[in-house]
Amino acid sequence: MIDLDLYQAKKLYPFQENTVNNVLNELRKNGNEFNLLYQLPTGGGKTVIFSAIAKKYIEEWGKKVLILTHRIELSVQTSKQLNAIGVENKVINSEVKNLDDQEDYSCFIAMVETLNNRLNEDENFIKNIGLVIVDEAHYNSFRKIFQFYSSCNILGVTATPLSSNKALPLKDNYNKLLVGESISNLIEGAYLSNAETYSYDINLHGLKIGSNGDFTIGSSDILYSNYFMQEKLIFAYEEVCAGDKTLIFNAGIETSRRVEESFKKLKFNIRHLDSTFSDKDRKDVLSWFKETPNAILTSVGILTTGFDEPTVRSIIINRATRSLTLYHQMIGRGSRKLPDKSDFKIIDLGNNVRRFGYWQDYINWQDAFKFPDRFLESRISELEDMEFEIEFEFPKGFEKIIDPSLLDTFSIKESYFDCMEKGEKGKMAIEYSLNNHFNAIQKSSKNLDHAMGLHNILQDHIEHRLKHYTKCITKSTENYFKYLLETYNRQLAQKIRLNIDE
């Protein structure tokens, strides 16, 4: 059992004090039903800041505060800080079925799924809430809670104000973005360690993009588990950070297990951790990692949030990602400052730096918040030349709806260059692609309505193809792509109506 009272309150830095005042001023100025999003880099002290905001809000407004998290570790961490600054709080976990004692508390911390279940049973489960604080606000799981607190203020906090689902931008739920200190400013002010980055060129051929827009775990495991990638990883470690306490981030469990095996053969002090571990085993591994100076911990996803180990001196990104949020979360695990640690190392084995820039680079977060599609497209497209060979991975169960083999036989890139060699216009490749999509729909459809439904299911695949086409013709402006997609869909729908019976 954790003794929360023994936890020492963290004193606010000047920039954190300013943030608290700025947020409260926004709430005073805009009144109820105003939702504010606050951005601050990992390591900037978001928990300390929003705990101080909660305390002052309770004192000034006389209403209670609800803090939402998606990991139990974050709930415990927040509760400890609130206790340390004198805020009576209660963690609502799966064991809490009712709140008969809620008058004893001014602040509640809840896991989003648990609270959603309680609110669906009783929408007045917690009374007199005035402010809802959402930690790691870029996760879309929190949206389901907002309907219960439409008359409250909502404060979202995140290091990267980009929604985890690009179809559901954060600007739909938040009225304004308040940008905190930049990474470079925090480094200059000695609040964060500086990073020295080492990039190794990786051939990403064979990676596939899944329905979430990122590279699939399956294709990543195949690429990163092979002998040559294991050799490159070991070479990079020995060249850059041998002997450092090191975190290795992988896309899949198979890769991480292979990494552990490869390093153990060379007598390196390494252990593996993933989400299938029991709480006890996980605590054992993390205790070992904390206490062992030259420890190497290879993991999958589990340590990107809610994990704080300042003694980490090297981060190895042994994967490729198209998620800027994940990129910053992984690197942020090494950025914590210590008296004897003013810098740390980053090894990039996924061409991520080329895709997103250096961790310390300036990012226009207001642009990301207001125009997320444009913001992401401009960054991801920087590496499109290298990732041009990436195959599209159909979602699970797709083969029961449409036969993917017919679609796989057609490559718009090959078709484009064939057209050019034959002296035809390159745009004929679009016509051939459209015919291929039509043939796949016709083969699988039962009637016209069914065919139109299949057309809709193929939207991600159509977009994927057309993006490859725009790379062929080196014309990839947002407006041109939008025109191309609309025209393609209109012509394909017309072809379906003319050739498939009702």
Image (cartoon, rainbow, N blue to C red):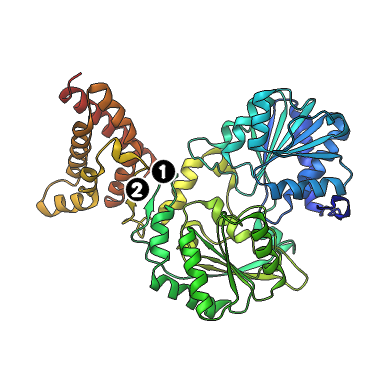
Q: How many marks?
A: 2
Quarter in which the C terminus is drawn: top left
**Which secondary structure lies at badge 2?**
loop
- Distance from label 2 to label 1 (Cα)? 8 Å
Instruction: Give the number of the disc on residue 393.
Output: 2
Q: Residue at x 72, y 39 (%)?
A: 93
Q: Residue 480 versus residue 141: which sits nearer the camera?
A: 141
Q: Residue at x 13, y 55 (%)?
A: 421
Q: Can you tell which quarter of the image residue 104 is in?
A: top right
Q: Position of residue 241 (x, y in %)?
A: 58, 76
> Residue at label 1?
211
Residue, far top: 502
Instruction: Give the number of the disc on residue 92.
Output: none
Q: Is residue 393 above or below residue 97?
A: below
**Which secondary structure lies at badge 1?**
loop
In the rendered structure, which amino acid carries the disc numbered 2?
Glu
Q: Residue 70 versus residue 194: which sits nearer the camera?
A: 70
For marks 2 and 1 on the same chain, the one whose residue lies earlier in the sequence? 1
Q: Can you tell which quarter of the image residue 36 is in?
A: top right
Q: Can you tell which quarter of the image residue 311 is in?
A: bottom right
* For residue 415, side relative to residue 123 (left or right): left
Q: Is residue 247 above or below residue 404?
A: below
Q: Are marks 2 and 1 in contact (CB under 8 Å)?
A: yes
Q: Residue 433 versus residue 15: which sits nearer the camera?
A: 433
In the rendered structure, which amino acid carries the disc numbered 1?
Ser
Q: Position of residue 363 (x, y in %)?
A: 58, 52
Q: Is residue 493 above or below residue 245?
A: above
